[in-house]
Amino acid sequence: MKISKILSYFILAIGVIGGILLFLMNNNFDGLMDKYGVTETKDFVKEGGAMDVLKEATSLVNPLYTLTLIIFIGVIAVTLIAVFSSLAKNPGGLKNTVIGIIAFLIVVGVGFVVADGVEAPLNDGEVLSVSESKWVGAGLYTFYFLAAIAVGLMFFSGIKKLIK
């Protein structure tokens, strides 16, 4: 049996498990809502100090989150395996990969230098530290820089095709 067929069955099984967990979670939420007289799921949090209600509602969602985490870790593992096996087959591509990683780190560094760090109160009463605020700003600036670079390269490519 080909690997693609095995992967198709595996993905189908994961989808079926996810669908079953979603169905069970929704049905149990309906029962929980009837039990506590809540009309919307967001009202579970507003149940004045009833932590048992929140814990019961959270326990219904945990299996779906666990499945999501397992899939996420699996996707990362498969991606890393594919990347490293490709690099092992083509060592010449290693140079281009390193250049790309260094360029990305330079963009992140520029974003970090440009970002401001300011303490900020959060909605839950906690305080966002200066360092955390600076990293959030660095992430935003990095996104903006990469988006601008992508748009600029698309524009440059279009102009280059028009000239030819």
Image: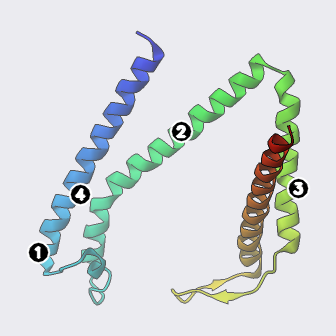
Residue 2 to residue 93: above or below:
above
Instruction: Tell me if label 1 and label 3 are in contact, CB under 8 Å.
Output: no
Where residue 91 sits in the image (x, y, percent)? 83, 21
Question: CA–CA distance between discs 3 and 2?
Answer: 27 Å
Mark 3, mark 4: which one is toward the viewer?
3
* Residue type at tag 2: Val
Q: Is residue 91 left or right of residue 23?
A: right
Question: CA–CA distance between discs 2 and 1?
Answer: 38 Å
In front: 85, or 45? 85
* Residue type at tag 1: Lys
Q: In which image quadrant can residue 84 be found?
A: top right
Mark 4 falls on what kind of element?
helix
Mark 3, mark 2: which one is toward the viewer?
3
Question: CA–CA distance between discs 2 and 4?
Answer: 24 Å
In the image, what residue occupies the spot 86% across and 42% down? 163
In front: 55, or 77? 77
Mark 1 falls on what kind of element?
helix
Mark 4, mark 1: which one is toward the viewer?
4
Badge 2 is on which residue? 75
Question: CA–CA distance between discs 4 and 1?
Answer: 15 Å
Badge 3 is on which residue? 106
Badge 4 is on which residue? 25
Mark nearer the N terminus (2 vs 4): 4
Question: CA–CA distance between discs 1 and 3?
Answer: 55 Å
Mark nearer the N terminus (4 vs 1): 4
Q: As drawn, which residue projects farthest toward the front? A: 163
In front: 73, or 56? 73
Mark 1, mark 3: which one is toward the viewer?
3
Q: Is residue 104 left or right of residue 43?
A: right
Where residue 3 sits in the image (x, y, percent)? 47, 16
Badge 1 is on which residue? 35
Query: Dot 4: few (<14), some (14–19), or many (≥20) neighbours within 10 Å?
Result: some
